[in-house]
């Protein structure tokens, strides 16, 4: 009854065929089976946002999704966004503004920030805070994170950093 | 923690899902968006034997208007409610409320049907269903049945759904042109469950409520339509009338104490929301004079 199930899923543009137990969540599948450890596992019940990834273009909590649910879906992780250069400017802004301390929340923060900037190219600080409201930083770095996202938005719109 | 082991079945149709539920009874759990079920499983609060995944059932998805009825499929995601032009036009209360539900990554997965079937007393969408006078459409072994949202919620995480049934859709009366709505909640942080919340729908004619539905949430074991609303209908609302309604509201609510708020704090906040709501719906700033949180 709890037998492994075959899934085919595209991860960062590459097709993956796997046999997974139903109880395996997407975060653990990415980390343990595919060694994509940029997706972090914090609270494991959808509160902290560290495990945020994209599924079919939308950000989701990978701890609240089963690997079997991604059958025939396209998953993008922080490694995918980083390697493609999609968020290179955002990463630079985080580094320049010191918007990370221990770095544990950073992959989730970057996923959520890029999601916001795709939908709303010129967000104000309140909109940035709202969109990141589901991502915890326990080093208390929120001001700098909001700064970095605000700067990236401004530069993408042709402004000065 | 991780979920304990379970078997998994991907339902291929509503009939298939119902057959699986009939065969496995209480041991089976329906998975739609998973945004409440998965945390509960990861925390080992529940350990189903079988997960019936209905996520692929396109027949349960989408928003459609037919005559005076707005039908929303159970699998319609929060993010879709937020973006839907039909919802914006015919049930704007819902669009406003959804912005308060959790966070973007959760709204991309969470579904309307899942939220209603889960029946968290502090959740926004169940209260909206009461305010909007929704009908819940349920499929079961003996066919389809419909019931008023008011009768659907029966307690903390409890509904009229049996283990063999599936919530397939909700039907809402299309908002009339003369209708107004109000939504507000107190929460520690944007996206958190409410400490106290209010979803309201009204018909206002010449500055007087012709109809007023006040659905409070997080002030009892289920969302509640306040009977005190009747005191505000059919006459010009004076500060004295509002004060009477406010006292009546306080008496009829049965809030619980938890780590977020005491009983008296919840009663107080409900009264503050009532003042804000009546003042906003009637466009009468004078009625919101005394209410501060």
Image (tube, grey):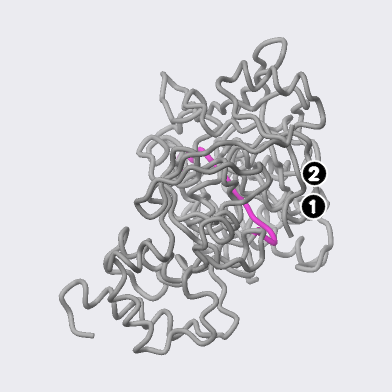
Return the x and y of residue A55 as percentages of the image width and height. 44, 49
Front-most of residues B71 and B209: B71
Q: Are marks 2 and 1 on the same chain?
A: yes
The chain identifier of the residue carrying mark 2 reads B
Q: Residues within 10 Å of mark 1 (few under 14, many from 20)?
A: some
Q: Main secondary structure of the magenta part?
A: strand
B260 sits left or right of B208 in the view:
right
Residue B105, percent across and down? 50, 56
Callout 2 touching callout 1 (CB < 8 Å): yes
Q: Position of residue A21 (x, y in %)?
A: 66, 43
Q: Nearer the viewer, residue B138 or B228?
A: B138
Q: Position of residue A50 (x, y in %)?
A: 55, 68
In the rendered structure, the answer to whether residue B2 lies left or right of residue B177 reads: right
| Residue in the foreground of this view, choosing between A33 and A122 | A33
B219 on left or right of B67: right
Task: Give the residue displayed 64% in from the left and 27% down from the top.
Answer: B167
Give how far apart the Cα atoms at labels 2 and 1 are.
6 Å
Chain that bears disc 1: B
The mark found on residue A84 in the picture is none
Q: Residue furthest left?
A: A158
Instruction: Judge whether residue B118 can be spotted in this image.
Output: yes
* Residue topped by disc 1: B44
| Observer-nearest of B200 and A50 | A50
Residue B204 within the segment the image draws in magenta: yes
Q: Residue furthest top?
A: B142
Q: Which of the labelled discs sits on residue B47, or is there none?
A: 2
* Quadrant for the N terminus of chain B in the image: bottom right
The reply to whether residue B234 is in sight is no
Magenta segment: B193-206
**Which quadrant holds the C terminus of chain B?**
bottom right
Splitting the image into 4 quarters, where does residue A93 fall? bottom left
Q: Secondary structure at mark 1?
A: loop
């Amino acid at each position: 009854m709890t037998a492994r199930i075959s899934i085919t899923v595209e991860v960062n543009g590459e097709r993956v065929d796997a046999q997974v137990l139903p109880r395996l969540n997407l975060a653990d599948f990415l980390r343990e089976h595919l060694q994509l450890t940029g997706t972090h596992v914090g609270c494991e019940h959808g509160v902290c946002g560290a495990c945020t990834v994209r599924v079919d273009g939308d950000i989701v909590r990978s701890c609240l999704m089963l690997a079997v649910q991604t059958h025939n879906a396209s998953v993008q992780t922080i490694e995918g966004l980083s390697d493609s250069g999609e968020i290179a400017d955002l990463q630079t802004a985080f580094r320049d503004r010191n918007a990370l301390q221990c770095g544990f929340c950073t992959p989730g923060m970057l996923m959520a920030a890029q999601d916001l900037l795709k939908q709303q190219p010129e967000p104000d600080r309140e909109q940035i805070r709202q969109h990141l409201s589901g991502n915890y930083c326990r080093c208390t770095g929120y001001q700098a994170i909001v700064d970095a996202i605000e700067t990236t938005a401004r530069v993408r719109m042709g402004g000065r950093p | 923690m991780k979920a304990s082991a379970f078997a998994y079945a991907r339902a291929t149709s509503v009939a298939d899902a119902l057959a699986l539920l009939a065969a496995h009874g209480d041991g089976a759990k329906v998975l739609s968006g998973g945004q409440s079920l998965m945390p509960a499983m990861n925390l080992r609060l529940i350990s189903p034997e079988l997960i019936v995944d209905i996520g692929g059932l396109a027949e349960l998805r989408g928003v459609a208007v037919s005559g005076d009825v707005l039908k929303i499929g159970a699998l319609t995601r929060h993010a879709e409610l937020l973006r839907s032009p039909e919802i914006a036009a015919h049930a704007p209360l819902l669009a406003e409320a959804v912005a308060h539900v959790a966070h973007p990554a959760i709204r991309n997965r969470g579904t309307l049907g899942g939220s209603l079937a889960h029946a968290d007393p502090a959740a926004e969408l169940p209260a909206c269903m009461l305010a909007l006078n929704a009908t819940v459409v349920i499929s079961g072994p003996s066919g389809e049945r419909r019931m008023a949202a008011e009768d659907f919620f029966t307690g903390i995480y409890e509904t009229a759904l049996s283990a063999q049934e599936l919530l397939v859709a909700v039907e809402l009366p299309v908002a009339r042109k003369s209708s107004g709505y109000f939504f507000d909640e107190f929460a520690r942080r944007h996206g958190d469950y409410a400490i106290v919340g209010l979803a309201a729908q009204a018909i206002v004619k010449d500055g007087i409520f012709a109809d007023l539905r006040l659905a409070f949430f997080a002030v009892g074991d289920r969302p509640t339509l306040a009977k005190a609303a009747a005191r505000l209908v059919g006459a010009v609302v004076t500060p004295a009338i509002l004060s009477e309604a406010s006292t009546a509201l306080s008496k009829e609510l049965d809030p619980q104490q938890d780590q977020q708020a005491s009983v008296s704090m919840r009663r107080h906040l409900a009264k503050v929301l009532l003042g804000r709501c009546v003042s906003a719906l009637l466009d009468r700033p004078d009625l919101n004079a005394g209410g501060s949180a």
